[in-house]
Amino acid sequence: MIEIRGTLFDEQTIAKKVKELADRISTDYAGKDLVLVCILKGAVVFMADLMRCLSMPVAIDFVRAASYGVSTEPSRNIVITKDIETDIKGKHVLLVDTIIDTGETLHCLLEKMKGKGPASLEVVVLLDKKPRRTVAVTLAYRGFEIPDVFVVGYGVDCAEQYRNLPYISVVRMNPDA
Ligand code: IMP
Ligand code: MG
């Protein structure tokens, strides 16, 4: 059982921030060959909104990472269960995720993507749960900094539920426990 505790970011606030990030990306990558890589599943909603706010054509691809072990442990075993299909050698790549927590997933994906020889490799995240970071990750584009709370909505789940909420909420786990 979980309890949804109000709205942290409503649809309008999210849309405004996504537009801001997209405007910066459009300026920075103008005239460049950009590939957006969506980190499944959590980034599908953010990716869909972000790419529609960009002013230039982009290629898109998808990667899925699964992590084994618990998030409170310093190092988890992260494996790619679905890799990108695009040849990113010599191309500008932007990894798109909705939330960064410990940073382990993005750190691991950045290492793996670097090996494919992109011309550049950067990250855009909507939510940065900075107090939880265990590994340094450079975020070229970041929407909101949030405290150490568990959120759902806008693609982000709790046990695979709530990804379809159009806003972002904080949840409290086991309210009856
Ligand atoms: P990291 O490797 O610890 O940075 O984990 C990032 C991933 O953990 C995100 O892409 C989410 O899938 C998941 N995650 C982190 N914080 C939350 C949260 O508050 N709600 C739901 N999923 C989260
Ligand atoms: Mg999840």
Image (spheres, grey):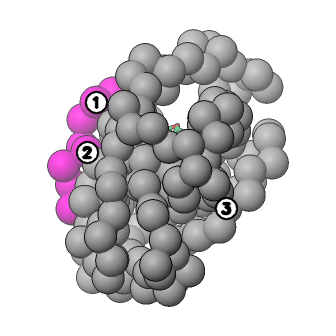
Residue 25 in picture, x, y percent from top left: 49, 76
Q: Which residues are magenta?
A: 159-167
In the picture, measured across the screen, residue 92 lies left or right of residue 148, that is left
Q: Could you give the CA–CA distance between mark 1 and mark 2, rounded to whole angstroms?
A: 7 Å
Q: Residues within 10 Å of mark 1 (few under 14, many from 20)?
A: few
Q: Secondary structure at mark 1?
A: loop
159 vs 139, left or right, is left
Residue at numbered disc 1? 160
Residue with the mark numbered 3: 139
Q: Amino acid type of disc 1? A: Glu
Q: Residue at x 79, y 40 (%)?
A: 134
Q: Secondary structure at mark 2?
A: loop
Query: Where does the N terminus fall, quadrant-wise?
Result: top left
Name the foreground residue: 1 vs 92. 92
Do labels 2 and 3 touch, CB within 8 Å?
Answer: no
As drawn, the label of residue 49 is none
Give the amino acid type for the residue marked by disc 3 in the picture: Leu
Provide residue 71's location: percent of width, then percent of height. 63, 27
The residue under label 2 is 163
Q: Amino acid at mark 2?
A: Arg
Q: Nearer the viewer, residue 153 or 44?
A: 44
Location of residue 169 (image quadrant): bottom left
Q: Mark 1 near ligand 2 (CB under 8 Å)? A: yes
The residue located at (56%, 43%) in the rendering is: 89
